[in-house]
Image (cartoon, helix red, strand yellow):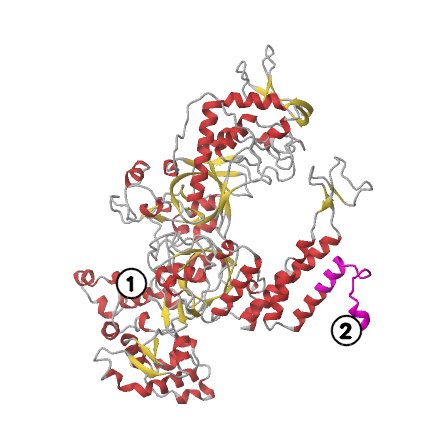
Amino acid sequence: KDELFEHSKYAHDIIGGRPVLGYPSEKGGFRLRYGRSRNTGLATMGVHPATMELLEFLAVGTQLKIERPGKGNCVVPVDSIEGPTVKLKSGEVRRLDSIEDARKVKGKVVEILFLGDMLVAFGEFLRNNQPMLGACWCEEWWIETIRNSQKYQSFTDEEKEAFDLDSLQTKKFSVEEAFKITEEFNVPLHPEYTYYYNDISIKDLVDLSQWLDTRRDYLEKGYQNGEDLELDLSYQKRILEVMGLCHKMENKKVLIDRNHAYSLLKTINGDYSKYLADEYYKMKVVDIINENIDFEIKDKAPCYIGTRVGRPEKSKERLMRPAPHVLFPVGNNGGNRRLVAEAAKKKKIKVEFARRECTNPDCRLSSFQAICPHCGSPTVIGKSGQKDINLAHMLSKASNNVGVRKVDEVKGVIGLISEDKLPEPLEKGILRAKNGVFTFKEGTIRHDSTDLPLTHFIPKEIGVTVPKLLEMGYTKDCYGEDIVSEDQIIELKVQDIVVSDNCGEYLVGVANFVDDLLERYYGMERFYNVKDKSDLIGHLIAGLAPHTSAGVLGRIVGFTKALGCYAHPYFHSAKRRNCDSDEDSVLLLLDALINFSKSYLPSTRGGSMDAPLVLSTRIDPEEIDDESHNLDIFERFPLEFFERSQEPLKPADMLDLVDNVSMHLGTDKQYHDLMFSHHTSSIHAGPKVCLYKRLGSMKEKVEAQINLAELIRAVDQRGVVEGVLSSHFLPDIMGNSRAFSKQKVRCPKCGAKYRRMPLTGKCKCGGDLILSVSKGSVIKYLEISQNLVNRYPVSHYLEQRLEIQEFGINSLFESDKSKQSSLDVFFGK
């Protein structure tokens, strides 16, 4: 374990307010489960929504730093995998199978014994070239053992159809039915009645067997009468908890449901004392049990994955700081808010910019438009320079041009950072302010969201009707049936996207701005004519990643309640993104086509990045980032995959057992029939906003982080406290102390910065100067750190480090010479 911890970077970089959910490979963490749902893959992994609801720090799109495979992922809900197991204040151990179950037990949980499954696609191991880890014993593996059994192979086609093997994935079996199938098909016992035996020690097994020996008569008496198994309360109850066997407590009695009691007594049925000898210490408990029963059980959890919460989910408009409505310079005349109307009160102001000049020798009119508004000839950008302008007249004229009188809140910029120094027309800023939207550095309006993959959707969950789908070219569901219902599962076209609700609302404002611009400024007909976000379905957008200069054409097909943007893995890969909590922009296409200009781009190095210089109108899977080529596209794993995964093989050695995109490149199948192995009922189940974002202060966040560490079996609370101090708070205090001693001073009026305070004590503009690093930023984590050290048993080394920092801060902000003392000091009181 120490070696695993040393090599797990995620476990060392613990950030305040972002909890550790599991130490490396620690029992009780997330259980590895192979498979892909319609909303996973491409560094996005599924957990049960009940787990998300229980922990509260996980919402749809929250980033997790993980032990393996890879370094991080995004979390999405998948409710067809196993949920968490908890211990309640009453002593009851319960598995949570739904969000409602999780809500019912909130405030009653004293320990989270098992976090539930993490659904990880085989492609994640292939992409990261990580050695295979043992598959867990789960329903899909159990079904494959039946499929490959001699008895099932002897069935006729009619018998196989009647047996309906695939329906067993979700069927609830009684214990007698499970044992009957085990006997008839000669397969291991069903996962529902197999427990986490390898999580206990051989000594625990011996103690548990002796405890159960007191009620061996139950199978002949109590079970036949429909009674639950009743055991006297004893220390062995903890063994049941670690095994994940659900039970209740009544009158100091342990009550086990009759189905699970039957399975437990049939499985733990022997004298295991001899296995306490040294020669057996390396044996696994499951192997010991199998030596003493006439059927087989499997290891339910060969592998656990350690995790830590990373960045929270995001869906928010992209804004400059401060956010302008128009790229028009007002210098320092607009105040801190850069208000154009404020600057216009000065009538004439001096700013640096350029105008466009008409190429018609008989006209030569100056304007800000590419086409001369007087004669219709093309215009060219003139020379930039300092110019005196009558801003009041220009603002009044622009207001009249677009018929908007309210211009008080229109915000400009201090100066232009482009090479040409060409400003936007004031009319655009007035119309943006009217519709509540803001411009970015190159004239477009953007909305950023966390990237999430999606290959299939249910119309009802994304708010799209069947007639609208038919209009957009969807005709069949993923099983080849005609689309007639909003409950069918439909394969997503590779350039269709599902944006968040708040993105949709913001794009309504963008659409109204574009329509106003067309109608009031350019004298053309309105294009979008939207009243609410549902009217945007079917309209085109451009997706853009921050580090690229190429947008990707897409189409809005629906909306999600999650704070993220669901799109096909090809779409994200075309933007050169891998979805590991990446955030990309969505631009309404007509806004980008009309308002983007290279003339607005910054002249600094990298100024052309994060700008839609080109637009990819068609996605070719062979030309996009090859990470999406590893996407799993099959409905079930073969039996041999589960068996061979128990060996530390390279993923490349397993390729003959799977199907992925790379095997179909250049064929028609690269665009469709990209199936999945695990269903989920909703792509936005569970919390929409994680607790990290809901809590206000860092003190509250750290408190919640430490409390959660105390609840989770797979986490050491002391280690979390020490990790927060050593990797976050102490380095922050030290760094800010150093920055305070070397800081510059700045003018809040004009923004000028000085390395040293001028002799005049004033800025050249006449404004007062203030510190750029405040005392508050230096001591912001000091009190929290002191509280942690006082409340928890951290190492003396960390205590002393904090004391040294506290001494340095006191020396920095308090005078050692002039410290006021009371008279009591002199009288010895």
Return the residue nearer the eye: 775 or 573: 775
Return the residue nearer the eye: 285 or 728: 728
Assign the C terminus to one quadrant of the image.
bottom right
- 578 to the left or right of 737: left
Residue type, mark 1 in image: Gln
Placement of 677 over or under 523, stated as above or below: below
Return the residue nearer the eye: 60 or 710: 710
Q: What kind of element bears circle 1?
A: helix
Please check the rendered image and state whether residue 825 is part of the magenta-colored stretch, yes or no: yes
Residue 778 in the image: state x and y as whole percent: 68, 56
Residue projecting furthest to the top: 362
Does the rendering let one see residue 657? yes
Badge 1, how many Cα within 10 Å: few under 14, some, many 20+?
Answer: some
Residue at (44% x, 87% y) in the render = 276
Instruction: Say which mark, if any, is on residue 124.
Output: none
- 44 to the left or right of 219: right
Kindly check if marks 2 and 1 are in contact, taking CB atoms under 8 A apart as contact: no
Task: Give, as a single range, the part of the protein colored magenta.
Answer: 806-829
Residue type, mark 2 in image: Lys
Placement of 730 over or under 410, stated as above or below: below
Instruction: Say which mark, if any, is on residue 169.
Output: 1
- 510 to the left or right of 320: left
Q: Which of the two marks, 2 or 1, is nearer to us in this view?
A: 2
Instruction: Say which mark, if any, is on residue 829.
Output: 2
Residue at (45% x, 23% y) in the render = 519
Does the rendering let one see residue 576? no
